[in-house]
Image (tube, grey):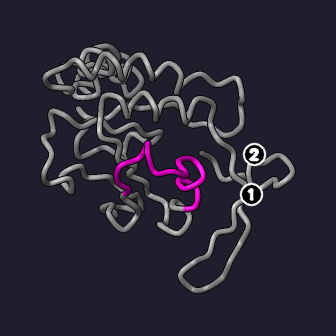
Amino acid sequence: MHCNTDMATAHVKLDITFPSGETVTAGINIRPYAREVLMEANKHFEVIIFTASHQCYADRVLDFLDPHRSLIHHRLYRDNCVYVNGVYIKDLRILTNRLMQDLIIVDNNAYSFGYQVDNGIPIISWYKDMNDRELYNLIDYIKVLSLAKDIRLAYRPTFRLHSFYEDFIKDYGSMLTETHS
C-alpha cells in the first residue's frame, strides 16, 4: 500500500480518524498482487501484518484489503515497534509463542528487520507502477519457504544479508583502500 497525496489518482479514498478525533481522507494506492500474495501466504503461514504505521491508519487500510478478516490473522503497529535512532524496528521477538525458524518479515526498509536480518525479505519500495510484479514474484518464493524446516537457512543463500558487510569488504575492500590513499 502507498498513501497517495494526489486524490485524483488514488485507487481508494479512506476516512482515517485519529485518536485526537480529527478525521482526514487519505488516498490509498494498492500494490499489484497485494491480495494474491496474502491469499498464497495464508495457505502456508499464519499472516501477521507488522507495520510502523499508526493503528488508526493501518486498520482502515487493512480492513479495506481484507474486509472479512480471513487473510490476516493478527496485526502489529508502530506501538509494537522499537524506536531506535529515528527509525522503527520490527523486533520479531515480540511474537513470544513462535519460533524464529518459522518467521518471515517482508519489508521495503531493511532496517525494519535489523534485529532478525536472517528472517527478512527485502522488497523494492512501490508507489504507483501498476506493472509492478514484486509481490507476484514473492508468491513462488513463499511456496518454497513453506517447505523449509528453518526459513533462515533456506533464506540465507538467496539474500545473503547475514554476510553482506563481509562480502562487500571482500569484493570492494581494495577499491575503498585505493580511494583513501
Tell me if residue 19 comes above or below residue 16 in the rendering.
below
Label placed on residue 13: 1
Q: Quadrant of residue 13?
A: bottom right
Residue drawn at point x = 52 percent, y = 27 percent:
135
Q: Which residues are magenta?
A: 60-75
- How crowded is the residue under tag 1: few (<14 C-alpha within 10 Å), some, or many (20+)? some
Q: Are marks 1 and 2 in contact (CB under 8 Å)?
A: no
Q: Is residue 65 magenta?
A: yes
Q: Is residue 29 left or right of residue 176?
A: right
Residue at the (29%, 27%) spot, across then down: 161
Is residue 39 one of those drawn in magenta? no
Dot 2 falls on a residue whose secondary structure is: loop
Number of numbered discs visible in the structure rendering:
2
Looking at the picture, which amino acid does disc 1 mark?
Lys
Q: Which mark is residue 11?
A: 2
49 relative position to 146: left or right: right
